[in-house]
Amino acid sequence: MKALLALLLTVLGTNAAIPPISTWDYQVKDWRDRAIFWTNTVDAPSYRNATDFMLYLRFTGVRRLVSRAGIYLGSGLQATRATFIIDGGRTNDVPVNFVAGDYTTNGLTGNLTDKYLDTGFVPSNVSPLTENSMHGGVYLHTFVSDSAGYIPAGVNSVAAGPAHLIIKHSTGTWIQFLTGSGTFNNVADATGLGFYVSTRTSTTFAGTYKNGVLFVSVDPTEGGGLPDNTFMIHARGVTASVDSFSDRQIQYYTIGLGLDAAQNRTYQLGVERLQRRMGRSVL
């Protein structure tokens, strides 16, 4: 018995990739295993911080509100295939037209022509999302001064109308989240950096939050149901195609149920702590 205990202590003391057993999380382990499959390695800080982040989401109750999330940790471009939370969509995201140099420790950078991350996430197929309870969000690492309209995350469909997050430049940065046939949030933003979450939580409220604080809201009078096309990252999914590509650098994305003000703030604090611990916060 003493020999076995000594061996266990030796393993735990020398293998930096293994956090204490009490902090293991089965979903984080699954993410790590898939990331290792695609890239051969996930360093110890990434694994520990991803585990800490997941435990925070569980403890605060935010985890049940997130249907899909990408964490952009791991070594190399193919690490983006390893989706962090998967309650809908593909088992792994599919990076399309990206090259190795697009991925750094600060996230993944797209372009304005053909690069996107295919999640396989179709909102109308994912329970318990409804047209009055949905969010989409991204953590933006770069501010790109460009006059083109582009969408870092979104989906549209003819039948259900749009539900997407738009970050574009005209007289500043404009953020829009649409559900139904055209209700949107529209507000100028001088910096365009950090964690943006747009959400609809009822028949009378849709809002966009920047770094945990409500930025703009609107009464979404239109209905229309949930979109039946694929929610894309670094672009927008439309019927049998992809458009409105974004050249922002993204280091986290989230899709899920509607988030109220307190839930947005709680979520932002966890996401921001993760970014700080990984040395890539923009705040």
Image (spheres, helix red, strand yellow):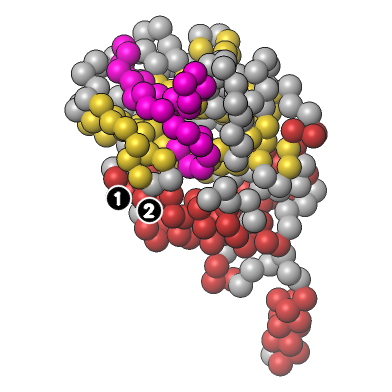
Mark 1: amino acid:
Ala
* Residue behind mark 2: 266
Residue 199, relative to residue 278: is it above or below?
A: above
Label count reads 2
Return the mark for residue 262.
Answer: 1
Closest to the observer, 10 or 144: 144
- Tell me the residue at 47%/34% (across/down): 190
Q: Nearer the viewer, residue 38 or 213?
A: 213
Rendering coords of residue 159 (x, y %): 36, 8
Q: Is residue 44 visible?
A: yes
Q: Residue 41 versus residue 145: which sits nearer the camera?
A: 145
For the N terminus, the quadrant is bottom right
Q: Which residues are magenta?
A: 168-196
> Are the residues tagged 1 and 2 within 8 Å (C-beta)?
yes
Q: Residue at x 49, y 18 (%)?
A: 170
Picture residue at 51% right of the left edge, 35% below the top = 192
Q: Position of residue 162 (x, y in %)?
A: 39, 16
Picture coordinates of residue 270, whole percent (x, y): 46, 55
Most extreme residue toward the bottom, as rendered?
Answer: 2
- Residue 117 magenta-highlighted: no
